[in-house]
Image (cartoon, rainbow, N blue to C red):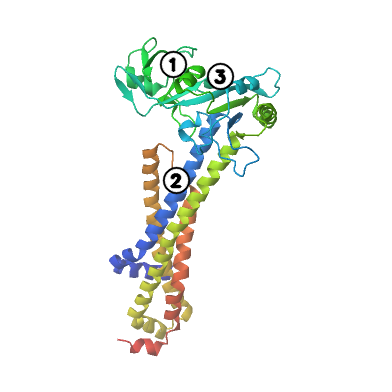
Amino acid sequence: MNALGIAWDSIWHHRTRSFLTALGIVIGVFAVVTLTSLGGAVKTYVNSKFSGVGANLITVVASLPRSGSHHGFGHGFGHGGGRNAFFSVPSTLTPADLNALLHPHQPAIATATATIAVPDLISHAGSIDNNASILGVTAPYFGMQNVSFEKGRFTPTGIVLGSSLAKSFFGKTDPIGKTVKVADTAYPVTGVLKSAQGAPGTDPDETAYLPLQTAMALSHQSTVTDMVISAKTAQLVPKAVKEATAILLKRHPSHNFKIETAQEILSTVTSTTSVITDFLAGIAGISLLVGGIGIMNIMLVTVSERFREIGVRKALGARDGDILVQFLSESILLAFIGGFLGTVLAGIATAVVGKAVGIPAALTTQSVVVAVVFSIAVGAVFGVLPAMRAARLMPAEALRTD
């Protein structure tokens, strides 16, 4: 405790220099803890969104033929991948494929739907919503995606609006029976959805839904963007995948399609997020190394300034170990203060950024513990050399120093 008291007195006596020395640790800990905390929050958010979509869902997307050298990664999961396509393979999936999947003798498949992205704009009374998406879907789509109707229903001749889109066009007026235009064609609004959050990268509140055949005619397409299959239970997903594969192989012998489950997509997304977070945290960790070097340099200067103090203490009976502990304590305490300040700032930044992007984010106990332990370790490692130099000074040599 005496060593810590002396260390604190020295740090407090040189407050400005001590703060500037600890700044490297503050920045390093702040960057590492903020990035890891936000990365963990993003993974949790993605997990919850995919869980909301349903663990029993299976997506079928277009792919290069199996005999090719590349199997493209599919479209965005669930809510029509047209807006988030990761590859440019033309789709060969058709409504006839959907009808085959809906054959009543498939024990594991409960239902299926197809989607197509419509690249046109939607408008009402001359007002255009540039942020809106337009999807062609079939009736089972809404139940499969856990999206409920606030009013109205899906019909073969009308259009369904997401909650935000309906408010944008009609405000507090009931939109049922009113019309909106897509590509200069008027469609009656037959339903409005309750506010919901969809899979990552989509916003059902800003989406309009047309009947599949209407959307295909509007887009002049004979194929669909993707198909989504619902297994009867999550446990039957593997069996449903086998059934869907067998059906589609009869219709597409070249195997120019790809089947993905929600868990596979979730695993891909979370592993990618983890790699990016760890990479960025590693880069940010370099500032911790710089901070440690800064502490070592200042501690070497401190030892040089306190030769006479060291000589007096040794002349009065202080052992080499006492001097070593004194200066090592000062280095560790300096790093700990930097780590503490960096963690506090990281907590504030994580909460602010999380709130700004709409993701619940906060520091975890693990990140705080790691930050504190790592700070102490940096102080200990980079404080050893100055402490050893101080401990090895001979009393007579130290007392002769001006």
Q: Amino acid at mark 3?
A: Pro
Q: Residue furthest top?
A: 177
Marks 2 and 3 close (CB-CB < 8 Å)? no
Q: Residue at x 59, y 43 (%)?
A: 70
Residue 161 horizontal side relative to residue 235, left or right: left
For label 2, the residue is: 38
Q: Is residue 53 above or below residue 160?
A: below
From the viewer's perspective, is residue 329 above or below residue 207?
below
Q: Earlier in the sequence, mark 3 or mark 1?
A: 3
Taking depth in this image into account, of 95 and 266 the one nearest to the observer is: 95
Q: How far across and down, in percent of the image, does residue 181 sit?
A: 37, 17
Q: In the image, residue 128 lies at what x, y percent?
A: 32, 23
Q: Which mark is residue 140?
A: 3
Foreground residue among 156 and 87: 87
For marks 2 and 3, give the one nearer the viewer: 3
Which element carries disc 2, helix, strand or loop? helix
Who's the residue at 47% across and 42% down the image? 41
Mark 2 vs mark 3, CA separation in Å: 36 Å
* Badge 2: residue crowd in 10 Å (few <14, some 14–19, many ≥20): many
Disc number at residue 284? none
Q: CA distance from mark 2 to mark 1?
A: 38 Å
| Circle 1 SS class | strand
Residue linked to disc 1: 159
Q: Earlier in the sequence, mark 2 or mark 1?
A: 2
Q: Check disc 1 and give the amino acid type.
A: Ile
Residue drawn at (47%, 81%), measured in percent from left and top?
A: 320
**273 left or right, relative to 123:** right
Quadrant of res 65? top right
Q: Amino acid at mark 2?
A: Leu
Q: Quadrant of residue 13?
A: bottom left
